[in-house]
Image: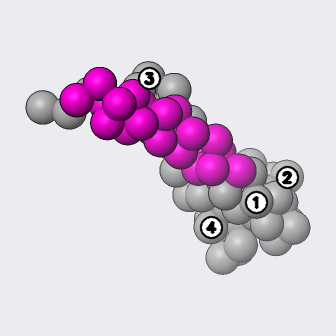
Amino acid sequence: MRRYPYSFIALGSLGLLCTLVGLFSLFGLGAWLHPVLDDPMAGLAFIVSAVALFGSAAFPLVIEKLKENEGG
């Protein structure tokens, strides 16, 4: 079984959460979660943050893959 770095799991989970909240806000359902999320621009900000979190999550995964290839 492959072990993923904790930082990849944490940042990927936060990215997924930001994506869901951003989509809710973009589709007009953000007020259901919080009144501030009723603005579609808040949804766009969450989507941009999600992309940044997914990019940050990729670094530990790539470093782990490079360490595996170097060792074996």
* Residue 45 covered by magenta stretch: no
- Mark before the other along the chain sequence, 1 or 4: 4
- Mark before the other along the chain sequence, 4 or 2: 4
**Measuring 85% from the left and 52% from the top, which residue is drawn there?**
36
* SS at circle 3: helix
Percent from the top left, x then y, of residue 15?
58, 47
Q: Residues within 10 Å of mark 3 (few under 14, many from 20)?
A: few
Q: Residues within 10 Å of mark 4 (few under 14, many from 20)?
A: some
Against 30, residue 26 (above or below) is below
Residue for badge 1: 48
- Quarter of the image with the N terminus is top left
Q: What residue type is disc 1 on? A: Val
* SS at circle 2: helix
Residue for badge 2: 36
> Based on the displayed image, in which of its 4 quarters is residue 70 positioned?
top left
Front-lying residue, 70 or 42: 70
**Measuring 56% from the left and 58% from the top, which residue is drawn there?**
20
> In the figure, is residue 36 to the left or right of 20?
right
> In the figure, is residue 35 to the left or right of 15?
right
- Mark before the other along the chain sequence, 3 or 1: 3
> In the figure, is residue 69 to the left or right of 41?
left
Instruction: Give how far apart the Cα atoms at labels 3 and 1 are.
Output: 22 Å
- Mark before the other along the chain sequence, 3 or 2: 3
Q: What residue type is disc 4 on? A: Leu
Percent from the top left, x then y, of residue 53?
65, 45
Residue for badge 4: 23
Write the start and end of the magenta stretch as one range: 52-72
> Based on the displayed image, in which of its 4 quarters is residue 14 positioned?
top right
* SS at circle 1: helix
Instruction: Give how far apart the Cα atoms at labels 4 and 3 are.
Output: 26 Å
* Number of the front mark, 3 or 1: 3
